[in-house]
Image: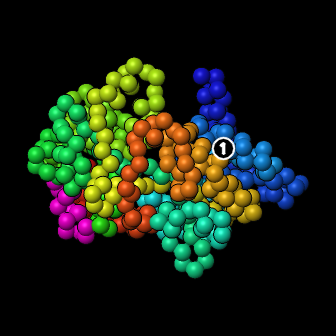
Amino acid sequence: MRRRLALTAAVAALATTLAATPTLAQQGGEQVLNLYSARHYQTDEALYDGFTRATGIRINRLDGDDNGILSRLKSEGAASPADVVLLVDAARLWRAEQDGLFQPVRSATLEQRIPSTLRSDDAGQGPQWFGISTRARVIVYDKARLQPAQVDTYAKLADPALKGLLCTRSGSHPYNLSLFGSMLERNGPEVTEQWLRGLVANMARPPKGGDTDQIRAVASGECGVAITNSYYLARLMRSSKPEDRTVVERVGVVFPDQAGAGTHVNVAGMAMARHAKNRDAALRFMEYLAGDAAQIYFADGNNEWPAVPAVQTKNPALMALGDFRREAVPVSAIGRNQVAVQQMLDRVGYR
């Protein structure tokens, strides 16, 4: 508890002073990196410490949610001290790129290690953002009420046989916008909108809560089936709390569309801020996050899969979930589709 309070106080102080942080030259030669991060995982602390030990570059970090960080970058404009930005979800990364908050990065290391499907489009100057970890949008179901074959595709979630059984968080949450954007890219607007209409018809209750809430609602019997990001389930699988173990025992999980297009995969990503003052340090940090040690840490610390395909994890929860077929839809296309998806959600009444 004392450590949490100390971290909270430090973040609060940083939030009020970071805008005035001196640049490298102003600090008499001390190397610094100003990081704006929406990754609210305390497990990332060791990553930042490791970078400083390895390079001597001190990190000033501002934590916040994605919307708060993006709003801050817009308001600060060219005066922003941000060098690197970490965001969660392809839809948010795409939106920030469209708003002109990032700059292109040309790095042979990043382009070799991060697959093209997990980074933004290259307009000739280099991608503007890169995935650093991945998570799957999986389906959890009540093992006492349903069989895996009834929920083994995203399409089946709109089957009238599941009427009154489906639970999700808000349709407009970026995690769902990205999934729905993937479905639009795969199936086209007419099929996707009809599918969304079917999801609304099958709701057990109005959308609410986060992904963990959906898993717990299935375990409690409030819902029969739900959608969640994989790392929320993995957290429960690794928990030592009896109540979490009970939840895990009561639900089943499937990776959808294994006989078809594959399971939707989203990213947490990094970008160099448009007005970065410490570009060399920023590039070193981005390449560090694509290195083997950092990639393994994302897997072990927050139950995400590495973005670098060659990196293997021994995370027990991820190993228990097993390997699966991933969709081939580029995450940049998923982001582009979010405006059209939101319009569909409004038409079908998906709150």
Examine the image and state in which quarter residue 249 appears: top left
Per the picture, the main secondary structure of the magenta-coloured stretch is helix
- From the viewer's perspective, tell me whether residue 157 is left or right of residue 243: left
How many discs mark residues in the rendered view?
Answer: 1
Rendered residue at 51%/38% (across/down) = 315
Task: Estimate the x, y position of residue 240 in percent, counting from the top left.
Answer: 46, 23
* Residue toward you, 250 or 273: 250
Rendered residue at 32%/68% (across/down) = 185
Examine the image and state in which quarter residue 226 appears: top left
Is residue 17 visible from the viewing direction of this image? Answer: no
- From the viewer's perspective, tell me whether residue 35 is left or right of residue 152: right
Q: Vertical placement of 304 versus 278: above or below?
A: above
Task: Estimate the x, y position of residue 291 in percent, counting from the top left.
Answer: 65, 54
Is residue 310 visible from the viewing direction of this image? Answer: yes
What residue sits right under mark 1 in the picture? 47
Q: Vertical placement of 34 versus 114: above or below?
A: above
Which secondary structure lies at badge 1? helix
Q: Is 222 covered by the magenta stretch?
A: no
- From the viewer's perspective, tell me whether residue 32 is left or right of residue 309: right
Question: In the rendered view of the protein, which quadrant contains the N terminus?
Answer: top right
Task: Estimate the x, y position of residue 338 in percent, counting from the top left.
Answer: 36, 63
In this picture the colour scheme is: rainbow
Q: Is 190 covered by the magenta stretch?
A: yes
Q: Vertical placement of 225 versus 108: above or below?
A: above
Amino acid under label 1? Leu
Range of the magenta residues? 187-198
Q: Vertical placement of 110 versus 6: above or below?
A: below
Rendered residue at 37%/21% (across/down) = 243
Residue that extends furthest to the bottom in the rendered view of this protein: 124
* Residue neighbourhood size for the residue with mark 1, other residues' Cα within 10 Å, grouped as few (<14), some (14–19), many (≥20): some
Task: Estimate the x, y position of residue 62 in percent, counting from the top left.
Answer: 63, 46
